[in-house]
């Protein structure tokens, strides 16, 4: 039984047994009786406390997501795949130098291939190395040029993130060496990256990857099944 249900039962029971004041208001004596009923139940069933805390934390996180949902779910240029007007948006905060992010790539590919109403938005969160910051800049350039996913997949396929692997992935996506090097040297993308870092902090992200789906935040490489379940939960709501 949840605390919310308990409170309703307590109010109804106490109101019937003790009588309400005129107009349906609860007097001091009735209020004290209700509080005793609730307290006694909690002491007898302390297992409901973690459930209540978990629900409170989930509600607070949903409120935090809702307050920044537009910023979270609006992609930078072409940094997305799937349904343009999807009924559910899955957002991944990732780092190209993150092995767990690389491991999640196949889960996301499977989800988007199976679910034609899903949109996946990618947000660069280069927190692991200078090379991952350089990769994020070229990735955002690729997003502007409509070559985001080719670059994204090519760099992950390359393995370790280095200046050389970044430039080779860019070339495979039709981005010249000069363009990629100019993006790395530029401060043009610093604002987008800093915005992503601020969003991740607001969401209490513990690292990469971090997924935002509906009202949920999932930290780490949680796997296909957990991601699919979160999508289904978001769609049901």
Image: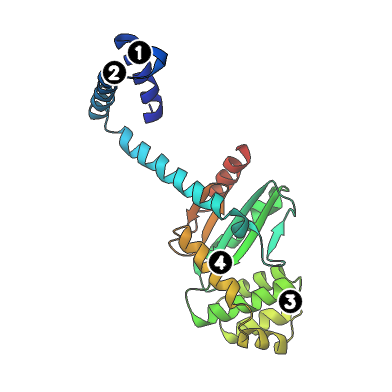
Mark 1 → mark 4, Cα distance in angstroms:
62 Å
Mark identifier at residue 173: 3
Residue holding disc 2: 30
Instruction: From the top left corner, tell me how far across and down residue 26 is, in percent.
Output: 34, 19
Q: Identify the mark nearer the N-term, 1 or 4.
A: 1
Q: Identify the mark nearer the N-term, 1 or 3.
A: 1
Q: Identify the mark nearer the N-term, 3 or 4.
A: 4
Instruction: From the top left corner, tell me how far across and down residue 160 is, in percent.
Output: 54, 78
Residue holding disc 1: 20
Circle 3/circle 4 CB separation < 8 Å: no
Mark identifier at residue 102: 4
Q: Quadrant of the C terminus?
A: top right
Q: Nearer the viewer, mark 1 or mark 4?
A: 1
Mark 1 → mark 3, Cα distance in angstroms:
73 Å
Q: Secondary structure at mark 2?
A: helix
Q: Nearer the viewer, mark 1 or mark 3?
A: 1
Mark identifier at residue 196: none
Q: How many marks?
A: 4
**How is the structure coloured here?**
rainbow
Q: Identify the mark nearer the N-term, 3 or 2.
A: 2
Q: Identify the mark nearer the N-term, 4 or 2.
A: 2
Neighbourhood count class around disc 1 (C-alpha, 10 Å): few under 14, some 14–19, many 20 upward: some
Q: Secondary structure at mark 1?
A: loop
Q: Residue at x 62, y 81 (%)?
A: 166
Q: Secondary structure at mark 4?
A: helix
Circle 1/circle 3 CB separation < 8 Å: no
Horizontal relation, residue 21 to residue 116: left or right: left
Q: Nearer the viewer, residue 179 or 161?
A: 179
Mark 4 → mark 2, Cα distance in angstroms:
59 Å
Mark 3 → mark 2, Cα distance in angstroms:
71 Å
Instruction: From the top left corner, tell me how far across and down residue 44 is, in percent.
Output: 23, 26
């Amino acid at each position: 039984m949840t605390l919310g249900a308990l409170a309703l039962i307590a109010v109804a029971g106490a109101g019937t047994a003790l009588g309400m004041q005129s107009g349906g208001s609860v007097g001091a004596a009735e209020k004290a009786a209700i509080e005793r009923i609730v307290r006694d139940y909690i002491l007898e069933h302390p297992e409901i406390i973690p459930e209540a805390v978990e629900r409170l934390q989930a509600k607070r996180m949903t409120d935090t997501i809702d307050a920044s949902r537009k910023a979270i779910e609006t992609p930078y240029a072409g940094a997305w795949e799937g349904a343009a007007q999807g009924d559910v948006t899955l957002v991944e905060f990732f780092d190209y130098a993150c092995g767990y992010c690389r491991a999640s790539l196949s889960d996301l590919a499977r989800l988007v291939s199976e679910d034609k109403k899903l949109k996946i938005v990618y947000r660069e969160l280069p927190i692991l190395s200078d090379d991952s910051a350089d990769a994020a800049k070229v990735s955002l350039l690729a997003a502007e040029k409509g070559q985001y996913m080719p670059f994204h997949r090519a760099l992950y396929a390359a393995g370790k993130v280095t200046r050389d692997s970044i430039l080779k992935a860019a070339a495979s996506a039709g981005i010249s060496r000069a363009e990629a090097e100019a993006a790395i040297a530029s401060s043009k993308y610093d604002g987008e990256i800093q915005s992503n870092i601020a969003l991740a902090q607001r969401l209490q992200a513990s690292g990469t990857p971090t997924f935002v789906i509906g009202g949920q935040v999932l930290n780490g490489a949680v796997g296909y099944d957990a991601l699919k379940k979160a999508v289904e939960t978001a769609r049901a709501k």
